[in-house]
Image: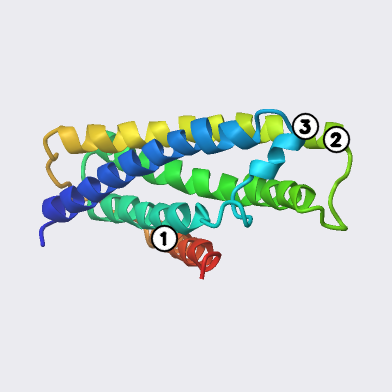
Amino acid sequence: MSRERATRFFLWVSVIAWGVLLGAKLFDLRVLVGAWSASPPESLDLLPYGPRFPVDTGDFFIPSSAALLLATLGATISGWRTKSWYRNLLVLSTAAIFVTLIFTVVAFWPRNAALWAYASEATDAIRDSNAIIAMVRQWVLFDWLRVAVASVGYVASIRALSVPFPAVESVSIPWAMKVVYGVCVAAVVVFAIYFVSAVL
């Protein structure tokens, strides 16, 4: 498979996945999150994952986000020897999903656990109502920020797919930079495996 075909294939997967995930995220934010964040702490009874909501949204978002991460990475690798302006679009899309997922693990997973502990009346839960209200408001704000970053990645992928594929250039890369690139790629793949293992 030529570099152009490989890049185009990964870009098609990326654009479709970005669209599906952003649409699902906006639905989640407006409908599901809109319900459980409406009047905290009482509205936390509507949090997903409990007996009243037996579907775990993570079962959809986690593997599909990891697949998107690998697709954008594939496009970046196969399109690496293109002109810098085009390569920057590919890198931007990969960076957007990678940053979004890192942000999800660091900022959302601990808050999800804390909010669920409160809703399920766990013995180690935060009991301060004001702290819970502040956490819910921060959660919603962070989620809109996550949507904004994802939108940048989506637009970058659409732009890369909608323009003619630039000529492949002969780029001389020092061995030290190749090592750095290899470590970065390995880190992304390892993170994707870790991310998906959360639902296995």
Q: Earlier in the sequence, mark 1 or mark 3?
A: 3
Mark 2 burial class by Cα count in 10 Å: few <14, some 14-19, many 20+: few
The numbered mark at residue 153 is none
Q: Residue 151's image quarter?
A: top left
Q: Mark 3 and 2 residues: CB-CB less than 8 Å, in contact? A: yes
Tally of numbered discs: 3
Q: Which residue is mark 2?
A: 129
The amino acid type, in three-letter code, at marker 1 is: Val
Most distant residue in the front direction: 52
Is 134 displayed left or right of 145 in the figure?
A: right
Residue nearest the viewer, comparing 45 with 159: 45
Where does residue 80 sit, x and y in percent of width and height? 27, 50
Q: Which residue lies at the image location 15% right of the left edge and 47% below the top edge?
A: 168
* Gap in angstroms between the C-alphas marked 2 and 1: 43 Å
Q: Which residue is mark 1?
A: 185
Q: Which residue lies at the image location 51% right of the left edge and 71% below the top edge?
A: 200
Q: Earlier in the sequence, mark 2 or mark 1?
A: 2
Is 71 displayed left or right of 149 in the figure?
A: left
Residue 81 visible at all? no
Where does residue 189 sit, x and y in percent of width and height? 43, 64
Where does residue 5 sit, x and y in percent of width and height? 12, 53
Residue 5 visible at all? yes
